[in-house]
Amino acid sequence: MVSEFRNHPLTDFSKDENRQKMQTALEEVKGQFDRTYALYINGQEIETGDILKSYNPCKKGQVIGNFHKAGNGDVETAIAAGGKAFETWRFVEPSKRADYLFKAAEVMRRRQFELNAWMVYETGKNWVEADADTAEAIDFIEFYAREMLLYAEKQPITPIAGEENEMIYIPLGVGAIIPPWNFPLAILAGMSMAAIVSGNCILLKPASDSPTIGQKFVEIMQEVGLPAGVLNYIPGSGSVIGDTIVTHPKIRFITFTGSTEVGLRINELAAKPQKGQIWIKRVVAEMGGKNAIIVDGEANLDEAVEGVASSAFGYQGQKCSACSRAIVDESLYDEFLEKLVERTKKITMGEVENSDNFMGAMINKAALEKTLKYIESGKKDGRLVHGGEAGPDSGYFVQPTIIADLDSKDQLAQEEVFAPLLAVIKARDFDHALEIANDTEFGLTGAVYSENPDKLKKARTIYHAGNLYLNRKCTGAFVGSHPFGGFNMSGTDSKAGGRDYLLLFLQAKTISQKV
Ligand code: NDP
């Protein structure tokens, strides 16, 4: 009997014991830097000789790992391996498939501090953010394993005389999993395991900025004995092998999380049937956001300031759910800005190996340069009230930046930057604030701070976001409690960590027998 799903607890780093464990893990992981890893296809390690390097964004030039890169030929090999494995994997009992997940979650719990440490170094997450990522990965795995058990049960169907009818869920085939670097374990593991537990075989192409975390996930799946060919790991450049994967006639589905630009390209390419293709490809694409927090005239100002600061600057603003717009009622606009600037001044920045630092570096040079360009354009349209410059040159640091007095149509109020860069916009009243909040092509997360229940009620219906939060920050969704996914250009609203998610990896078959 499987217990009810519960979220994995976050580590309390105020306890000496936990701090010590994390420190030890950081030291141990550091001793494993600069290793070289092969592709993993059909249970075999394959070396291509073409190397991708992964770096610590907080310490320029520090190599975390070297990866043999997949080319287009390797994609062919991986798809063939997945196709062969699918012939047996799809018939493995769902409960047995779920067991691999339960075992993997167990290994992750055991290796939690080590996984956290890899994320600190490879993606610039502070200890708490890295720990939350590992916890979320464990949650996804535990949650989807249980969900598969439910989908494997007898499904309700209306009886009719003279027939015995049933509807069963079967897997789709070989799919591609293409995750981003910003939740390098949680999203990667969540998308992969949902596909696998449903009976599919996958090609997993990690983001080029975080292949080591993907590698650790693959090692865990090797440790729990997942059969060869079910999971094929093919690090490589999205711009080189992406189209080959997406357009391949034997690919049945593509599960993507990343930028809107790439998501739309995948959607478009996948829609065109290729020679020999006998299905319509299924695309799940979770993409960007321009998430807003409304601070109403009747808000608890201190709580709103805290919520905005933590949603805007946590993990350097590099969360799809991050707050990049604060829409503030004119009655408390000046006071809000003053308090927000005071709060932001307290943010510490530097190498996140050191737990005193709240903010680390941006993921890479391109991200830093893009951010600085947006700051310049924001300064022309609005008023810089905090930050605005790059941080120490030892890494890709940028100061937490606030630009006020922007108009809803300004570039910085419309385009996703994916950085610690907050646009502040003044609203005449609550209706105007809602109008501004919805004045975007995106619709991922949003929040409202107000003590007025009527306004909160109105926001429930009018605010168009896949994940709406009332009187709390707009980041930090928990698996099971906050099924996650966005509207409009934010994606297909797949609701990761929710009850419907596995249906995206399954198809229903109805069987009727005359009796
Ligand atoms: P990208 O779109 O740049 O990359 C995402 C993945 O797509 C990477 O693995 C990348 O590989 C791959 N890729 C790139 N080009 C192609 C291509 N032509 N065909 C197929 N795959 C390709 O996004 P980021 O990694 O920079 O992630 C940040 C973005 O992700 C933000 O926009 C953020 O909002 C979004 N996001 C959305 C979430 C949601 O739930 N809605 C959650 C988390 C992030 P490579 O690295 O090799 O280029």
Image (cartoon, rainbow, N blue to C red):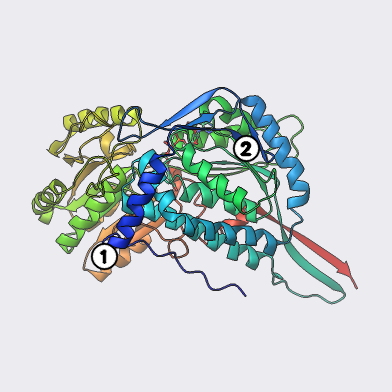
Mark 2 secondary-structure assignment: strand
- Is 400 positioned to the left or the right of 494 in the image? left
Q: What residue do we see at 41% from left, 43% from top? A: 29
- Is 318 positioned to the left or the right of 166 in the image? left
Kind of residue at disc 1 = Lys
Vertical position of residue 94 compared to residue 272: above or below: below
Position of residue 193 measured from the top left corner of the image (x, y, whole percent)? 58, 52
Q: Does any portion of residue 433 appear in the rendered image?
A: no
| Pointer 1 residue | 455
Vertical position of residue 98 compared to residue 273: above or below: below
Of 382 and 84, nearer the camera is 84
Position of residue 204 measured from the top left corner of the image (x, y, whole percent)? 58, 40
Q: Nearer the viewer, mark 1 or mark 2?
A: 2
Q: Residue furthest right?
A: 515
Q: Residue furthest top?
A: 50
| Pointer 2 residue | 40
Kind of residue at disc 2 = Tyr
Tag 2 or tag 1, which sits nearer the N-term?
2
